[in-house]
């Protein structure tokens, strides 16, 4: 880009006016998916995820409506490893408290399905959805359906012997949720906006940052699945150590990367630091440059600000030994940081050829 391109205002996409209702619809679904990610975090942090041992996707809308029904559902929970090994002290009133979050999590997922399907039908019948959009919308619908199955597959892993869900399945479940969120945001942006510019150097940097954020978040899912945030609650050292002494005690070594809480927490820290450093370097490049479109600059500043908040949340969550409020905020912060990175990538992906020196 040359200096004169600073005043360039990108034209709207060809079908922007017609696609606006579709973009608003997808944006609303994206907000619901973000809230779902936060609710999922609360469900995990309150140890509520194994309270519902039945999967009734079509008839499971209502909670137990009578005392006999509550006792029936509670008796099913009493047969689970979690109750027998961890929560044998629970009364039915205690059970109702953990049941609430898992119930809300499942119902919210069904509401997302309705929020996607009903407007889709209306917009399709009224001719507001262009034929070119159907493959992308079909992909989103398929992801949503698969995600429901993955959620139950994850829950089932904690109903057999071990009173905890598999960290592998938890990571897959969160990864698919973030993929759905990212696809919704990208699609909505493409419908109503043209990227601010094409700048290969910034685009490559944005792609690297996006991948690092994704890897950091997946690493965080393993931390959550192993309760690894409840150990080594000091920062920046881990109880006085740069590398925890039990980093590689399991054999073979690769098992430590996914099943050793000390290793998983250390790796999450290192990847998060590398991710934050990469974002800061992108910000420094932008601040030194004079040929950046204003929208691109705003997107990168927003990403840096959100990443800073997310790092602070992560450290606070660790030091406080993962309280529900901070833990849920940290999970929501991961989703918002990813969304900001999607915005940066979008703004640097325009059709205009770059020219001249970039920052």
Image (cartoon, helix red, strand yellow):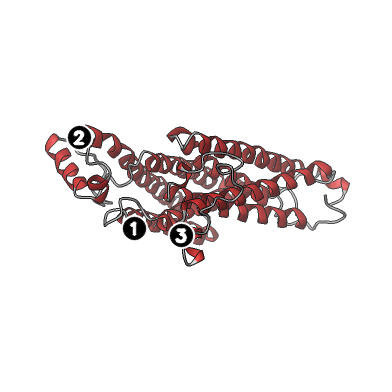
- The residue nearer to you, when weighing 167 against 238, is 238
Label at residue 153: 1
**Secondary structure of residue under mark 2:** loop
Compared with 252, 102 (above or below) is above
Q: Which residue is mark 2?
A: 91
How far across and down, in percent of the image, does residue 184 sit?
52, 50
How far across and down, in percent of the image, does residue 60 sit?
25, 46
Task: Decide which of tag 2 and tag 1 comes sooner along the chain.
Answer: 2
Label at residue 138: 3
Residue at point 47% right, 63% down? Answer: 255
- The residue nearer to you, when weighing 328 against 348, is 328
Residue at point 59% right, 42% down? Answer: 240
Q: Do callouts 2 and 1 mark residues in contact (Cβ within 8 Å)?
A: no
**Secondary structure of residue under mark 3:** helix
Q: CA distance from mark 2 to mark 1?
A: 27 Å
**Secondary structure of residue under mark 1:** helix
Q: CA distance from mark 3 to mark 1?
A: 23 Å
Q: CA distance from mark 2 to mark 3?
A: 45 Å
């Amino acid at each position: 880009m040359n200096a004169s391109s600073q005043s360039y205002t990108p034209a709207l996409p060809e079908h922007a006016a017609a696609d606006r209702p579709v973009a608003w619809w997808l944006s609303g679904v994206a907000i619901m998916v973000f809230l779902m990610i936060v609710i999922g975090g609360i469900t995990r942090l309150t140890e509520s995820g194994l309270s519902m041992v039945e999967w009734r996707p079509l008839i499971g809308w209502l909670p137990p409506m009578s005392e006999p029904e509550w006792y029936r559902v509670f008796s099913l929970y009493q047969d689970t490893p979690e109750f027998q090994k961890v929560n044998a002290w629970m009364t039915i009133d205690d059970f109702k408290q953990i049941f609430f979050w898992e119930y809300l999590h499942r119902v919210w997922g069904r509401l997302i399905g309705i929020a996607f399907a009903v407007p889709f039908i209306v917009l399709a019948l009224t001719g507001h959805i262009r034929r070119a959009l159907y493959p992308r919308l079909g992909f989103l619908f398929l992801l949503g359906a698969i995600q429901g199955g993955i959620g139950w597959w994850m829950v089932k892993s904690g109903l057999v012997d071990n009173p905890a869900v598999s960290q592998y399945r938890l990571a897959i479940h969160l990864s698919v949720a973030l993929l759905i969120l990212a696809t919704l945001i990208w699609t909505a942006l493409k419908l109503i906006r043209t990227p601010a510019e094409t700048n290969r150097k910034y685009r490559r940097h944005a792609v690297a940052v996006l991948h690092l954020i994704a890897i950091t978040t997946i690493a965080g899912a393993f931390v959550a699945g192993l309760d690894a945030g409840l150990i080594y609650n000091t920062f920046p050292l881990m109880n006085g150590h740069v590398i925890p002494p039990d980093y590689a005690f399991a054999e073979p070594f690769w098992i430590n990367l996914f099943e050793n809480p000390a290793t998983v927490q250390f790796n999450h820290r290192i990847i998060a630091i590398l991710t934050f450093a990469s974002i800061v370097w992108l910000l420094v490049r932008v601040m030194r440059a004079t040929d950046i479109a204003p929208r691109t600059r705003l997107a990168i500043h927003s990403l840096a600000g959100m990443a800073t908040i997310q790092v602070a949340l992560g450290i606070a969550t660790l030091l406080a030994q993962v309280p529900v409020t901070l833990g849920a905020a940290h999970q929501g912060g991961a989703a918002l940081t990813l969304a900001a990175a999607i915005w940066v990538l979008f703004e640097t992906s325009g059709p205009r050829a770059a020219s001249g020196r970039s920052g």
